[in-house]
Image (tube, rainbow, N blue to C red):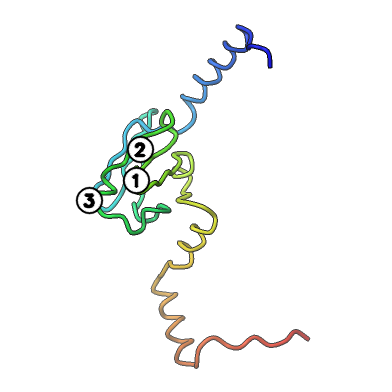
Amino acid sequence: MADPTDAELDAAAALGEQLASTEPRAASARYDRTTGRILVELRNGSAFAFPARLGQGLEDATDDQLAQVAIRGAGYGLHWEALDVDLSIPGLAAGVFGTKAHMARIAGRSTSPAKSAAARANGAKGGRPRKTAGV
C-alpha cells in the first residue's frame, strides 16, 4: 500500500475535525451515587445521564466499581477496567445500553401499573390462554 499523500492527510484531518464537532464525544463522566446514574458531559456542551445498571455488564456492579468510569477512544467510549466493560457514547446517547439481546432483556422486565393489573387479571382467570392450532 502506498504512503498517503499530503492531500489525503489534509482531507483526513479535516474530516476528523468535522466529526469531532458533530458526533457526541465525552468530555467528562462520573457516577452519581445518589441517583444511581452515570452523568456524561459532551465536548459540545450538552450532557446526558443514564441509570448505570441499565448498561450491559454494569447490572451487578458495586457503587465503588461504577465510580471508576474512564473515558476512552478520544471521547467515543466509557470504560470500567475492573469490570472489563466498554460502552459507546454514540450508542448511549441514542439509548442503546448494550447488545440487541441485552436490550431485549431490559425491555422485557419493564413494569407499569397497567402491566401489573393485566398480569393479576390473567392470573385470576387461570393464566395465559393456551395456544390453539391454526385453522
How many angstroms separate mark 2 from mark 1 (CA)?
7 Å
Quarter of the image for residue 11 reads top right
The residue under the point 42% across, 43% down is 86
Q: Secondary structure at mark 2?
A: strand
Judge by depth and name the residue closer to the eye, 41 or 83: 83
Residue 120 lies, with reference to residue 101, above or below; the image says below
Upstream in the sequence, badge 2 or badge 3?
Answer: 3
Q: Can you say whether 72 is above or below 57 in the image?
A: above
Q: Secondary structure at mark 1?
A: strand
Looking at the rendered image, the quarter that the N terminus falls into is: top right
Label 2: which residue?
47
Q: Residue at x 72, y 86 (%)?
A: 133
Q: Which mark is residue 49?
A: 1
Name the side, left or right, on which 117 lies relative to 6: left
Q: CA distance from mark 1 to mark 3?
A: 13 Å
Marks 2 and 3, Cα distance to the nearest angstrom?
18 Å
Q: Position of residue 97 (x, y in %)?
A: 45, 51
Q: Are marks 2 and 1 in contact (CB under 8 Å)?
A: yes
Q: Could you tell me the amino acid type at mark 1? A: Ala
Q: Tell me: 14 left or right of 50.
A: right
Regarding mark 3 in the picture, which secondary structure is present there?
A: loop
Badge 1: few (under 14), some or many (20 or more) residues near its Cα, within 10 Å?
A: some
Please identify the residue farthest to the left as the structure is shown.
34
Q: Which image quadrant for residue 115?
A: bottom left
User: In the image, residue 63 lies at what x, y percent?
Assistant: 24, 52
Quarter of the view holding residue 29 = top left
Mark 3 — residue?
Answer: 33
Percent position (x, y) of residue 17?
49, 19
Q: Residue at x 34, y 39 (%)?
A: 40
Local crowd at mark 2 within 10 Å, few (<14), some, or many (≥20)?
some
